[in-house]
Amino acid sequence: MLVGERMTKDPIVIHDDTPIDEAMKTMRDNKIRRLPVLNDKGALVGIVSERDLLYASPSPATSLSVYELHYLMSRIKVADVMTTEVITVTEDTPLEEAARIMADNKIGGLPVVSDGKLVGIITETDLFKIFLELLGAREMGVRLTMLVPDEKGVLAKITARIAELGGNIVSLGTFLGEDPTNALLTVKVQDVEEKDLMEAMKPLAMEVMDVRMCAECR
């Protein structure tokens, strides 16, 4: 899956000469936490987050009057508080690469560009939604987590056994195990009873860590 398939297209943007109180209102009205920043030529020149704006805003404990506050905030422009060294991705960037970039750089969103033009934005919220899909969080089924050896053919054995039972795999994910010799595998299966699924795994000598029936796992 690529960024272009899950990004928000034509994102809400703001210009670098916008006062920060207008930028804050735009975020609150649209329930978003960051805005790509464009200059008067429509080029991407920065990104501003809700945190940037809050840090730049006067403290609620200030002794300034309402009029003084409005005047002060009208004087501070987005260009004064935005991040100018913007990390971007393209539409054909793999989603896992976008997630890695966000995690490594401790940022919550990436503008998406094509030929130097802003075409979208991918955020941590988008990635959370994808994570829910990958684990079938909104699907009914038996959710089984096992510690499996990190060996060739293990997944094939497990999925073949589930197929023999007539089960339908709605999600399957592998995660780091206890050490390099093993991995955690979580699979959600429909059309198979919990006890039958457990019995089917015994001959494969898999260590079951958790099993539960889920309508929507919480």
Image (cartoon, grey):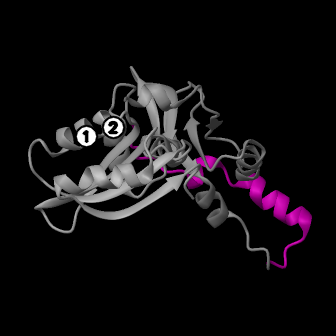
136 relative to 53, above or below:
above
Residue occupied by mark 2: 165
Please name whichever residue, 144 or 165, is drawn nearer the observer in this view of the structure: 165
- Label 2 packing within 10 angstroms: few (<14), some (14-19), many (20+): some
The reply to whether residue 36 is in sight is yes
SS of the residue under disc 1: helix
- The residue under the point 37% across, 29% down is 2
Please name whichever residue, 138 or 15, is drawn nearer the observer in this view of the structure: 138
Please name whichever residue, 189 or 185, is drawn nearer the observer in this view of the structure: 189
Please name whichever residue, 217 or 10, is drawn nearer the observer in this view of the structure: 217
- The residue under the point 33% across, 41% down is 96
- Residue 121: percent from left, percent from top: 51, 35
**Marks 1 and 2, Cα distance to the nearest angstrom?**
7 Å
Which quadrant holds the C terminus? Answer: bottom right
Which quadrant holds the N terminus? Answer: top left
Q: Which residues are magenta?
A: 62-88
- The residue under the point 40% across, 55% down is 195
- Label 1 packing within 10 angstroms: few (<14), some (14-19), many (20+): some
Mark 2 is on which residue type? Leu
Mark 1 is on which residue type? Arg
Residue 74 lies within the magenta run: yes
Residue occupied by mark 1: 161
Marks 1/2 in contact by CB < 8 Å: the verdict is yes
SS of the residue under disc 2: loop
- Residue 75: percent from left, percent from top: 73, 54
Looking at the image, residue 64 sits to the left or right of residue 97; the answer is right
